[in-house]
Image (cartoon, helix red, strand yellow):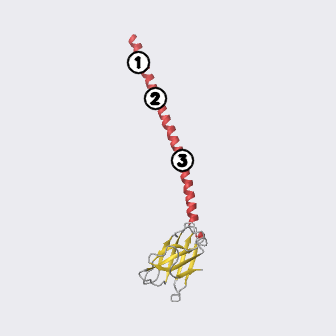
Amino acid sequence: MQTTAELERAQLKTLQNQLEAERLISVRQNLDLRQALADASGLRTELTQARTQNARQLAELQSRYDLANFKVARLASLLGNSPEAVAIAVWNPLAQEGVLTVEKLATLASDQDYQLWLIDPQYPAPVSGGVFTIDAATGTGRASFRPTKPILQAAKFAISRERKGGAPGGPEGPIVLISD
């Protein structure tokens, strides 16, 4: 009889241990599920924030490259010997950058460059948009430009003939093209 009672106690202890193990496993699974839910909630929040940031960046890019904000200027020749020379400057004031296209400009000597100038009333001298080259055979060229100072109002654009490398403080050579 005593062995039957010991056997029953051992079985009871085994069942208690098994029940405790299952409880511990259940608690651990519950904690893991809560952590997974918290992680998912955090990811959901991060995803929402990322979507909001992407929408804001897209709106900024659309505004920045909205053609209605661009200024397009035609530069006409001031040279009697090349009246057909012409340039078009497309200026994006929000991005502070532009593109210049020129046609029928005279070829320069090897020690000279053409230089683009932006005329902004806030500055006493024109602001450099950089030097550019043309195709010697056709007199055409295309260049992207960024002014050396922030431009609030690009009132006019001009192109001068300068020494190689350009003039840093303002046009030194003759203005060959200018916008209205």
Which quadrant of the figure contains the C terminus? bottom right
For the residues labelled 3 and 2, the Cα–Cα distance comes to: 32 Å
The vertical placement of 55 against 138, above or below, is above
Q: Give, as a three-letter code, the residue at label 1.
A: Ala
Q: Position of residue 44 (x, y in %)?
A: 54, 47
Mark 1 vs 3, N-terminal side = 1
For the residues labelled 1 and 3, the Cα–Cα distance comes to: 50 Å
Q: Which mark is residue 22?
A: 2
Write the residue at 54% across / 78% down: 158
Location of mark 3 (residue): 44
Quadrant of the image occupied by residue 64:
bottom right
131 or 170, which lies in front? 170
Q: Give, as a three-letter code, the residue at label 3.
A: Arg
Write the residue at 54% across / 44% down: 41
The vertical placement of 11 against 154, above or below, is above
Mark 2 vs 1, N-terminal side = 1
The vertical placement of 180 against 59, above or below, is below
| Callout 1 secondary element | helix
Q: Position of residue 84 (x, y in %)?
A: 52, 86
Task: Please state which of the two labelled residues, at mark 3 or mark 2, is closer to the viewer.
Answer: 3
| Callout 3 secondary element | helix
Q: Give, as a three-letter code, the residue at label 2.
A: Glu
Q: Position of residue 33 (x, y in %)?
A: 50, 38
Mark 3 vs 2, N-terminal side = 2
Task: Please state which of the two labelled residues, at mark 1 or mark 3, is closer to the viewer.
Answer: 3
Location of mark 1 (residue): 10
